[in-house]
Amino acid sequence: MKKALIVVDVQNDFCEGGALAVPGADAVIPYINELIEQNEYDQIIFTQDWHPANHKSFASTNGKKVGDTINLNGVPQFMWPDHCVQGTFGAEFHKDLKIPEGAHIVQKGKNPEFDSYSGFQDNNHFVKTDLDDFLKYHDIQLVEIAGLAMDYCVKFTCLDAVQNGYITCLHFNGTKAVNVKPENGRDAVYQMVENGVTVLG
Ligand code: VGL
Ligand code: ZN
């Protein structure tokens, strides 16, 4: 069975000192590097949150406060601080992340009108990235997922992986939650398990 590792959004803005720092984020990097170095995967994919400066998920774009929620083209949109703006340091992968030569990179969140938590598609389910086609092209049947943040982009990438027919495993020790509310990480784990995601220690 062919396996892929999907590393979600290990970018400076989600790490220590970043604009949208996920508590404990830096601890996932050595864990993920070990997975990469064990080299048991047929493909390794890195997703990258990649927003234009005027992205509508930013509170500043809408004259809102961080933590507010707006209706964005029919779906609720949490208001984030400006983060992962294309071409900025914050959008770069963390320097300690050992990205292998030839790894496949999936950029998402590029359309200012739509957010994209999942590596597979935008939150409105309008446009797919090339991730599913890439995995199918390479005959991948099982995906292991790690990265940031467990209650947003990792969760939605896991749920879409199940929906797209992959055996889907979450590396619990390779992910951290934003925990806007303290229970968000725990609830995300339950939601993933209920939907067929296997949690690896
Ligand atoms: C993410 C919030 C906004 C994530 C991305 O990578 O989990 N969270 N954009
Ligand atoms: Zn984002």
Image (cartoon, rainbow, N blue to C red):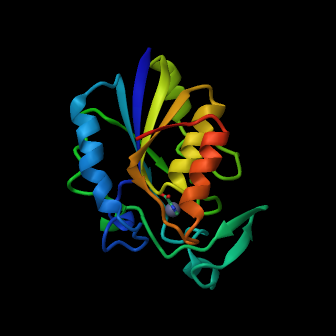
Q: Is residue 128 in view from this perspective? A: no
Q: Is residue 58 left or right of residue 147?
A: right
Instruction: Write down the quadrant of residue 5 in the picture.
Output: top left
Numbered circles on residues, count: 0
Residue ID at (49%, 66%): 178
- Where's the C terminus, which quadrant? top left
Residue 53 percent location from the top left of the image: 48, 70
Q: Is residue 181 above or below residue 30?
A: below
Residue ID at (49%, 54%): 150
Residue ID at (58%, 78%): 59
Residue 14 percent location from the top left of the image: 39, 64
Residue 51 percent location from the top left of the image: 49, 62
Residue ID at (42%, 64%): 84
Residue 133 percent location from the top left of the image: 54, 27
- Where's the N terminus, which quadrant? top left
Q: Is residue 139 above or below residue 148?
A: above
Instruction: Write down the quadrant of residue 161 in the picture.
Output: top right
Q: Residue lying farthest top?
A: 1
